[in-house]
Image (cartoon, helix red, strand yellow):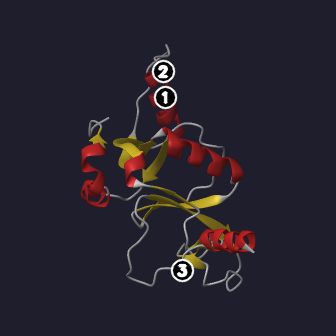
Amino acid sequence: MRLIGLLVILTLSLIPAPLAAEGQHATTGLAFHQAVAASVGLADPARFERLERAAEETDVYVARTAALVIHLDEITTVVITREPVYADAASGTEAFRRRLGLPGQPQPIQITSYYYRATIHVDTRAARRIHTFTTKNVGQRVDVRFNGTRLAVPKILEPIPSGQMSTSLNGWTRAKIEQVFAVLKPKLTWKADEP
């Protein structure tokens, strides 16, 4: 009888917590929510929310409960870099060639704009959990959030073996980045603002 009681307690502890009502505190830390493509109405609204996207794109539903959470104390650094958007493929190729120090005839590089990229480094415990999660979910989309703010909804192309992940913060300003990552200010590093 004791064994059955213990199994019931263990089973109940594995059931996800109830969903937070609108306006309640979001998950603290770096959260990975599973995302699925589905027809309107097929995803259970109690478990999934519809991601607002352009009309011509496939509907994507995001799990309300995070599948993986990396806590603030497990994040070691966040490095923000400013990356160029090249006008054409030739400019991108030339910039790549120069970074590698390859010989050749220098070509002009045309840059149309810039965007920010966040590279988040985590400790070894968190790195193992991220590796396990990404290994099990190769080919799937994931909604990555920091303290409830969506960073990106990428497709996992391969497992992340190291303790670092990188994401584009398209359309973000420096002020927004500083606001979102304010709780990690001592761990936040800005690379040179110009390329």
Amino acid type, label 3: Pro
Q: Taking 175 as reference, is 108 left or right?
A: right
Q: Which residue: 43% across, 55% down?
A: 71
- The residue wearing badge 1 is 96
Residue 74: percent from left, percent from top: 42, 47
Q: Do the residues labelled 2 and 1 touch (CB within 8 Å)?
A: yes
Tell me how many marks there are: 3
Label 3 vs 1, first from the N-terminus: 3
In the rendered image of this protein, does residue 11 appear above or below residue 39? above
Residue 65: percent from left, percent from top: 55, 71
Question: How busy is the neighbourhood of tag 1: few (under 14 within 10 Å), some, or many (20 plus)?
Answer: few
- Kindly report which numbered mark, 3 or 1, lies closer to the viewer in this rendering: 3
Task: Give the spatial CA distance, label 3 vs label 2.
Answer: 50 Å
Q: Which residue: 66% across, 44% down?
A: 158
Task: Give the spatial CA distance, label 3 vs label 1.
Answer: 48 Å
Kindly state the secondary structure of the residue where label 1 is placed.
helix
Kindly state the secondary structure of the residue where label 3 is placed.
loop
Question: How busy is the neighbourhood of tag 3: few (under 14 within 10 Å), some, or many (20 plus)?
Answer: few
Q: Taking 152 as reference, is 34 left or right?
A: right
Q: Can see residue 118? A: no
Residue 100 bears which disc, if any? 2
Q: Taking 93 as reference, is 75 left or right?
A: left
Q: Which quarter of the figure has residue 80? A: top left
Label 3 vs 2, first from the N-terminus: 3
Residue 18 bears which disc, if any? 3
Q: Are marks 3 and 1 in contact (CB under 8 Å)?
A: no
> The N terminus is located in which quarter?
bottom right
Foreground residue among 5 and 60: 5
Q: Taking 143 as reference, is 40 left or right?
A: right
